[in-house]
């Protein structure tokens, strides 16, 4: 986790930008891929683009759902400390409330609460009052194990599921680490990003840190269309990972969760 989870304070959840890019989608039968048509060029968003953008740990895990984690006495005690039902993962609201009462907690328990805040608020980013996945939340009892877990896969899976389930003809609320989609749009449309994404100098890495993303929300779709359509001016399109790459896991149709 660490520096990979840093997001500048001016980096916005630019829902209009992401929503309009998603309306350019073309049909894709793969559960864990999105393709949008930029002019005449299809651009992919998959686990591999997500990993390149965020540099989260996206390594394969046999039991990503963590179905074999037993409820321990330490877990019960910590859940009681947070004031959360032991059978549920804490919601963002419950975590915020616990933060106001944690000054006397041990250092490790305060770290656990902070890690859960990152998990609930950024990695899955569900609605504030909804409980999180209790199996994943319980991993916080092992602080080092929690930091090493494949949270990139969890974040991507949650995000892609949210996108695939939405009716794009309506205003939508996407759950998950939607900032990754915003950076995907900026990278795919560099001319648009230069005007609206406020790219930072010296090509910061990972890509998540390469844009401020805070300049203007007006006429988003019109400006995207201007840069999307090669017949309306000079248009440049870039893919984060060329789809011609054929090494393991980067060929079209690969299912990272099989």
Image: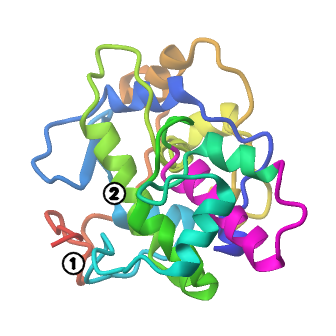
Q: How many callouts does the rendering have?
A: 2
Q: Identify the residue at horizontal 55%, vertical 46% (top origin).
A: 91
Query: Residue 202 lies in magenta, yes or no?
Result: no
Q: Classify 10 Å Cα crowding around label 1: few (below 14), some (14-19), many (20 and above).
A: few
**Taking 198 as reference, is 170 above or below it?**
above
184 or 31, nearer to the observer: 31
Q: Residue 215: percent from the left, percent from the top?
A: 74, 28
**Taking 33 as reference, is 222 above or below it?**
above
Q: Which residue is mark 2?
A: 157
**Taking 93 as reference, is 69 above or below it?**
below
* Disc 2 secondary structure class: helix
- Is 103 positioned to the left or the right of 228 in the image? right
Q: Which residue is mark 1?
A: 246
Q: Identify the residue at horizontal 30%, vertical 29% (top origin).
A: 24
Q: Identify the residue at horizontal 26%, vertical 37% (top origin).
A: 40
- Is 214 positioned to the left or the right of 183 in the image? right
Would you say residue 233 is visible in this rendering? no
Magenta stretch bounds? 100-125
């Amino acid at each position: 986790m660490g520096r990979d989870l840093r997001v500048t304070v001016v980096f916005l959840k630019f829902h209009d930008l992401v929503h309009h890019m998603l309306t350019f989608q073309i049909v894709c039968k793969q559960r864990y891929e999105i393709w949008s048509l930029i002019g005449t060029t299809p651009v992919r968003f998959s686990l591999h683009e997500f990993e390149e953008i965020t540099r989260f740990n996206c390594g394969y895990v046999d039991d990503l759902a963590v179905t074999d984690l037993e409820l321990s006495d330490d877990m019960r005690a910590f859940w009681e400390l947070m004031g959360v039902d032991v059978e549920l993962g804490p919601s963002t609201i419950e975590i915020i409330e616990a933060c106001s009462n944690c000054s006397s907690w041990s250092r490790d328990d305060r770290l656990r609460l902070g890690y859960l805040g990152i998990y609930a608020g950024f990695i899955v980013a569900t609605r504030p009052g909804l409980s999180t996945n209790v199996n994943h939340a319980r991993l916080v009892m092992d602080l080092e194990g929690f930091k090493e877990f494949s949270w990139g896969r969890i974040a991507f899976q949650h995000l892609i599921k949210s996108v695939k389930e939405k009716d794009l003809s309506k205003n939508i609320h996407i759950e998950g680490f939607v900032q990754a989609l915003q950076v995907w749009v900026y990278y795919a449309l560099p001319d648009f990003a230069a005007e609206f994404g406020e790219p930072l100098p010296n090509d910061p890495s990972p890509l998540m840190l390469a844009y401020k993303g805070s300049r203007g929300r007006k006429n988003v779709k019109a400006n995207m269309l201007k840069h999307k359509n090669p017949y309306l001016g000079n248009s440049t399109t870039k893919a984060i990972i060329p789809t011609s790459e054929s090494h393991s896991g980067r060929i079209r149709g690969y299912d990272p969760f099989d």
